[in-house]
Amino acid sequence: MMRILLVLLAWGTVGLTSAFAQSAPGKVQLKQADIDAAVRLICPAGKITHDKDGKTSGCRVCPKATDFFGQPRISWEMRAEMAGHFTSAKNSSLLLDGTGCDAHANNFGGTFVFAVTGEKVRLLRYENGLITDQCQRFAYADGRDGLACRGGWMGQGEADLTVFVSSFDATGRPTSKVLIHVSDTTGTCGEDKEQAVEQGGISEVQFVPKPQAAPGEITGLTIKAYTGGVKCSVVEAVQKTRRAPASVKNYTIEYTFDGRQFRLAPGSRAALAKFGRFSTP
């Protein structure tokens, strides 16, 4: 999955700029000591960078397994950290999302997966293109944690926004399923104001919590998104007025979750079909 390179201005909430409507409290505490130890495993001594508060923030060189490993004058920036039971119900693990050391095809980033046992941190693998800086954790029935994420990619004015879910095996290898694709081609608008384009976005992603259950246990996921055809002249007007064009409609897509997999709710099939290219895990 990929990160949006440009935030598109449209009516409503756009792309990856908003967080999940409901945060799932974590069962595993994120420790700075584990983050520091993890970065030391992928960044040579003396190359680790720190933010203004002194916390580890990245590496002055590209870590091994990234696309640009070994290339000069390129650095890796850590974008997000998350602890959980991702690879095992019993053992803790750590995800570090970073950018700057991967090709456009991998949206310039990926995620390192680490196992954490006591005070020992061990690198399991690096997954190019798995962007986890816009994710929330949820619980599987077997005790592992999974991720529900916003993702996206943009090239030559065309954006592909997604919501996807990911799970990890014992080696840290992820398996991902896309729940919705939303296309937006308003970035292709130029001098031709009569050009027809597609305007779309994801305005909200919300977990449906399981009643009287432990944090992170859910029974489903609700996605609010919009799509519709417009002319470039309308796109220009929207940016000024922030008023929704009549041709762009809001839709709600619901997925149920049985503790093992997400299933599209039958009543949401017509709404999901409005977005054209989609998958139904």
Image (cartoon, grey):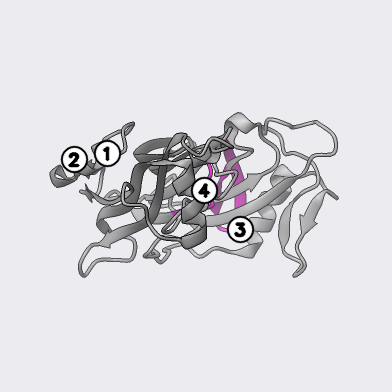
Q: Are marks 2 and 1 in contact (CB under 8 Å)?
A: yes
Magenta stretch: dominant secondary structure: strand
Q: Residues within 10 Å of mark 1 (few under 14, many from 20)?
A: some
Which residue position holds label 2?
A: 270
Drawn side of residue 203 relative to residue 29, left or right: left
Which residue position holds label 4?
A: 132
Q: Residues within 10 Å of mark 2 (few under 14, many from 20)?
A: few
Q: What is the CA distance from the residue labelled 4 to the residue labelled 1?
A: 27 Å
Q: What is the CA distance from the residue labelled 3 to the residue labelled 1?
A: 49 Å
Kind of residue indicated by mark 4: Thr
Circle 4 SS class: loop
Nearer the camera: disc 2 or disc 4:
2
The segment highlighted magenta reads 112-135
Kind of residue indicated by mark 2: Ala
Question: x, y percentage for residue 254?
Answer: 23, 50
Q: What is the CA distance from the residue labelled 2 to the residue labelled 4?
A: 29 Å
Circle 1 SS class: loop
Kind of residue indicated by mark 1: Lys
Question: x, y percentage for residue 260?
Answer: 26, 44
Q: Residue at x 28, y 54 (%)?
A: 222
Nearer the camera: disc 3 or disc 1:
1
Nearer the camera: disc 3 or disc 4:
4
Circle 2 SS class: helix
Q: Residues within 10 Å of mark 3 (few under 14, many from 20)?
A: few
Q: What is the CA distance from the residue labelled 3 to the residue labelled 4?
A: 24 Å
Residue 130 lies in the magenta-colored region? yes
Kind of residue indicated by mark 3: Glu
Which residue position holds label 1?
A: 274
